[in-house]
Amino acid sequence: METYLRNRGDRMPERTTPMGLEPDDDGNVDESNQLHYGNNDEDFSHTLTQHQPAAMHFSKSSLRSRWLVLALTCTVMTASYYSYDIPSALHQQLSDYMPQSSNFERNFNLLYTVYSIPNVILPLFGGNFVDRYGAPQCLLVFASIVCCGSVLLSIGVSNKSWEVMYLGRFVFGLGAESLCVAQSTITSDWFEGKDIAFAMGIGLSISRLGSIFNNITSPKVANSRGGIQSAFWIGPVLTFSSLFAAALIIFVDRRAIKKLKKRGGDVASTELTEALLEDDAPVRNENNNPCSESGEVHLTDFRKFGIMFWLLTISCFVVYGCVLPFNNVAAGILLERNYYKPAPSSCHLLHPDQCTSGYLQNGTNNPSLSDSTGALCSIDPSQAPLLPSSVNITSSASDQSGEWDNEAAYVYPNLTTHDVQCNDPFWYSACTSDYCTKESASTERAGKVMSIPYFISALSSPPLGLLVDKIGRRAQIASLASGLLFIVHLTMAVSHSSPVLPLVGQGIAYSCYAAVIWPSVPLTVDKKFTGTAFGVITSVQNIGLALFPLLIASIYKASGNSYIPNVEFFFMSCAGLGVFIGLLLNRLDRRNGGKLNGITSDDESRADAGFANVEDEYFSP
């Protein structure tokens, strides 16, 4: 108790006996040495107890090492996020690298579908496992699975095998979403009742740095001499490194439990002192402490969840449907819409059947000319250069043909953009170097721009989380964020302006939504079901993340291999449903006391609820 009072800034004279009587060297008590807090023991009891809550409970959220745990979970999640987003950053490079197929868009989106399919079921068990066996231990297991999946994916890319790549993404998915469940549960456990939205905001912020680094780094590595294979192998290196952080979390968590057990002894002795001082003091009943409730957690406990939780789940389903699937194909959307638009149809090459640039051009100028005037054609910087209408070149055409792909000839009577694979030296060095050089620059630019939402999320999530802890209004913010997403995708669909402003809006909306949706989950279920609740909502979210990529591929193909505008209309409809669900959520929350829109208790109310601030050795001064 004295430790608690010192932490609270209160003062009291030191005492060595319950009654304030100091023994002499022989162990005898001299009442003249009694410290006077009043006229009798009742006054002392009043003085003693007025400085502390009625029941003082110690928890991990009172330890300073909670920030170390948060940093370690962020390290694990950053590696996972980086690896997850590698395919999206290399959309065009994969199109050039993998065997030519008219079904590339379907094959590409299947990488995200097979990732999500196991997570329709596994987070239910993952959340239950977390509740049963402990989040830190589960975090290490899930991180190991993520690492194995990342390795398999990279092996598949190295061998140009979609099947092995799908296997890698499937294994990756076996661990990644359950990894999120374990991380969310650890954060809830270590920040219980205090700064939980702020902590989750920091977690999302730092984790999303992995996506930002990927969007910027992967295209550069893939376009360099390292090639697309090197870009993919960065993922296994990072996920393997994250295993050490996961192992350290287990160590810190065990040390914290030991320390809290020791502190719990101090609490018991304090309550015994109060009982001795008050003859009519009630006997302490452990069952009155909600933290001491026992009982097994079962998978079927989700049937006990109320309508508030299920509305949150539906909201997560539709709103994330216009956030994460958008990022999967954002590179393709930005290239088509802004940075690598098709070459002007009103122009033609002077020599349509000859290479445009490279050492096979043989010094012959092959300019682009206007169909109507015959003058030089003006090609916008955002447009692709013209390609030859046909190509018929054999290996005997150049002494450098040994650098080309394993083909004896490049014969394309009707050359299209899908035939040009810029990872092949024939195209990027010998015949169409202008086209491939501009494509590389455009993909790197698109990678930077598509990072804007995650960059804004990384900057704004922590202060937004702190703000939510202070002002509440979670359901209201979720509705406003969905409305902003609706406007963003409407703009992307019908306008050809710069994508920067819409993606800034996407980042703000995503940050606001994420800052309120996940901290709202523990507010809608009992504490002992927290892991299971996170598992259920993650499972339902993955139903959408498994279906939406296939829907997007179908819309793309039905729209003549084009993203704009129909794919954006699909994202817009998801955001509109999010607005509708948000309005229902607010209406129900008002009827149920405004728990979601209420304010999280501060330190003082937390102390009144029986939590003490505890120093621990990791950050003690």
Image: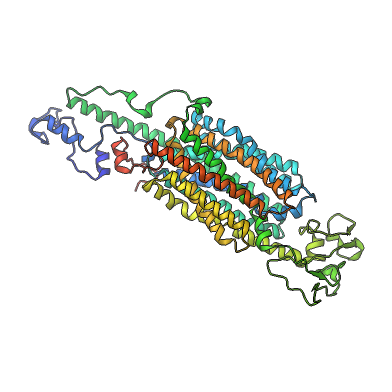
Judge from the rendering whether residue 216 lies leftward or rightward of residue 471; answer left or right.
right
* Count of numbered circles in the view: 0
Compare residues 19 and 317 and report the one nearer the observer: 317
Residue 6 visible to an observer of this rendering? yes
Judge from the rendering whether residue 226 lies leftward or rightward of residue 431; answer left or right.
left
Residue lying farthest right? 396
Residue 507 location (% of width, % of height): 53, 54
Compare residues 258 and 465 and report the one nearer the observer: 465
Residue 129 location (% of width, % of height): 53, 30
Residue 205 visible to an observer of this rendering? no
Judge from the rendering whether residue 337 lies leftward or rightward of residue 370; answer left or right.
left
**In the picture, residue 8 is in which quadrant?**
top left
Above-or-below relation of 410 to 275:
below
The colour scheme of the drawn protein is: rainbow
Residue 35 location (% of width, % of height): 12, 36
Above-or-below relation of 599 to 392:
above
Compare residues 197 and 325 and report the one nearer the observer: 325
Residue 602 location (% of width, % of height): 33, 44
Q: Residue at x 61, y 35 (%)?
A: 120
**In the picture, residue 527 is in which quadrant?**
top left
**In the picture, residue 426 is in which quadrant?**
bottom right
Looking at the rendered image, the quarter that the N terminus falls into is top left
Compare residues 147 and 538 and report the one nearer the observer: 538
